Amino acid sequence: MAAATGERAPAFTGEELEKLVDGVLPQYALLYGPPDQQVRAHEKIGIWRAIAKEVRGLGVHHRRGTHCRKRWEDIRRGTKKTAESLLGMASQRRRGACRQLSPLMFRILAVAYPDLDGRVRAAQQTQGGEYKHHLLCCRAVEVSGWGRRAVGPPRPGRYL
């Protein structure tokens, strides 16, 4: 067990992330919806255990409900942050960062942040493109004293 040896659990694979998102999205209203739709805390624990069981079914690693919940929170937060930066709403972009929304992120946006999803899709349509991965690349910058200057070509993006 990773916790007993002091080692970190391996990162979620793409298949595990897909299974996690497939398990959470139908249950989203029960876990994060308005208070009148949410279930009690012990029922949420049961939902996360069921999702973890599905993820464990892939046989990659023994995931617990808390691992799945924490990874979902990270994915959801990252998806929102990426969508906001694509729309120019983020207060400060990281230097040299490439931002894009993968199909998995679009699925999360549609359920978790429908208003943000609509604005991202509208922004894509106004740019005249079909449904494609939205990509924003910034040049790497060199910081010296108080000034900054771009160095090198934009770096390619990466998926979730």
Image: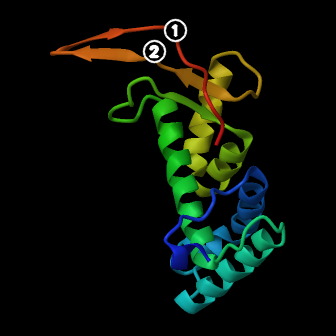
Marking on residue 103: none
Q: Amino acid at mark 2?
A: Arg
Quarter of the image with the C terminus in it? top right
Q: Which residue is mark 2?
A: 139
Q: Toward which corner of the image does residue 50 lie, by quadrant?
A: bottom right
**Figure disc tally:** 2
Q: CA distance from mark 2 to mark 1?
A: 6 Å
Picture disc at residue 153:
1
Q: Residue at x 47, y 19 (%)?
A: 138
Please state which of residues 128 and 105 is positioned toward the viewer in this rendering: 105
Task: Tell me: residue 16, above or below residue 4.
Answer: above
Q: Is residue 54 left or right of residue 72?
A: right
Q: Position of residue 27 (x, y in %)?
A: 70, 72
Residue nearer the viewer, 94 or 123: 94
Q: Residues within 10 Å of mark 2 (few under 14, many from 20)?
A: some
Would you call the spot at circle 1 few (<14 residues within 10 Å), some (14-19), or many (20 or more)? few
The colour style of the image is: rainbow
Quarter-of-image position of residue 62 = bottom right
Q: Is residue 33 visible?
A: no
Q: Do callouts 2 and 1 mark residues in contact (Cβ within 8 Å)?
A: yes
Amino acid type shown at disc 1: Pro
Q: Please tell me which of labels 2 and 1 falls first in the chain.
A: 2
Task: Give the residue at the far left of this rendering.
Answer: 145
Q: Position of residue 144 (x, y in %)?
A: 21, 14
The N terminus, quarter of image:
bottom right
For image coordinates 57% across by 80% down, the residue present is: 38
> Residue 109, position in %: x, y?
62, 48
